[in-house]
Amino acid sequence: MKKQLFSLVMMLALVIVAGSAMAQTNVTPYPGGTYSYTLSGIKTNSAGTAVIAITGANATIKNVEGSGIDYAGTNIATPAATVFTLNFDITYGLLATGTRTLTVTVTDGAASGSCSNFIELEVIINPLPTLALSIAASESDYCQNKKSSPLVDNEAASVGATTNSFTFTVSPTITNDPDVYTYSYAITMPAAQGLATYDIAYAGPGTWNEGAGTVTGATSETDGVFTVTFTTTTGLAPIDLTATITGTPTLTATNGGATYNGTITTASDAVSVKTMPSIGTFN
């Protein structure tokens, strides 16, 4: 029996370092993301080589041992009689789908006929995440508040009425969502148009920047509610207050770094604030 001239030891584990989320790791990546892989415990008796390969299209191996460039399938040198750890990244294109096989083959020595060993890792690519947003107002026509009897003598019911309030609600629908993600969108809220002590407050996922007209850093599939308040204002013509989601919303997978464009199901909605007649006093 031919004597085996090398010891090839691989603590056969491609270690997940792309993130801690259970369903979004380097063995269950999302299209468009870049994930890191570490293969430890490689040891050859003589100076040898390692070769990395992955099945299927739209997957690019890169940054082997910190090279910063795409990997061309060439031999990667392994030291003699020294435990070696191989590090590399893979970027999965937006069109990447299905189940892949990632293979690292290690050969002892450079001579023809040298023995080799290999390890395989199953990689199951998640379907593309989707984000859809819609907006809805709590009212369509709105009559401003007024007091009910008993009233202050000789004072119109509109004076000192309770604050007017209605909402615009942005509802997200996310499918195939990564375990850790954020999404953002742009939104235009209506101006006061003469309504007194007019204000808009936001409650929901992420942060609303009124000046920029954006909601950023949202992390859950829960509604964002914009509450419009104002004091009853008499003598104005009817006012349409319209809120509109603008541009293209985006969803970013935190682990892997991919960003996906979303869609808008219902872009805008409006509340028509009816006129409140003015009344003076009895003389």
Image (tube, rainbow, N blue to C red):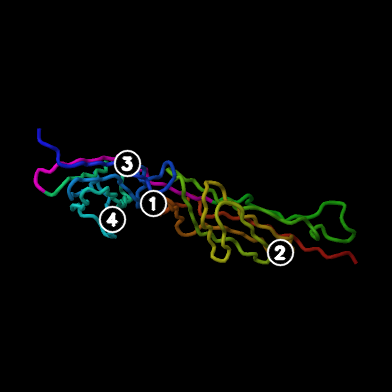
**Label 4 environment density (alpha carbons within 10 Å; few <14, some 14–19, many ≥20):** some
Q: Relative to residue 38, is residue 248 depicted above or below?
A: below
**What residue is pinned by disc 3?**
13
Labelled disc at residue 256: 1
Q: Earlier in the sequence, mark 4 or mark 2?
A: 4
Report the Cα–Cα distance between label 3 and label 2: 63 Å
Which portion, as a residue range, is magenta? 111-134
Three-letter amino acid code at the position of disc 2: Thr
Residue 186, percent from left and from top: 51, 59
Q: Secondary structure at mark 1?
A: loop
7 or 120: nearer the eye? 7
Report the Cα–Cα distance between label 3 and label 4: 17 Å
Which circle, 2 or 1, is nearer the viewer?
1
Three-letter amino acid code at the position of disc 4: Glu
190 or 34: nearer the eye? 34
Three-letter amino acid code at the position of disc 1: Gly
Q: Please say if the residues under marks 1 and 4 sit with CB atoms less than 8 Å apart.
A: no
**What residue is pinned by disc 4?**
65
Q: Secondary structure at mark 3?
A: loop
188 or 81: nearer the eye? 81
Report the Cα–Cα distance between label 3 and label 1: 20 Å
Report the Cα–Cα distance between label 2 and label 1: 46 Å
Q: Please say if the residues under marks 3 and 4 sit with CB atoms less than 8 Å apart.
A: no
Three-letter amino acid code at the position of disc 3: Ala
Drawn side of residue 45 relative to residue 253, left or right: left
Which circle, 1 or 4, is nearer the viewer?
4
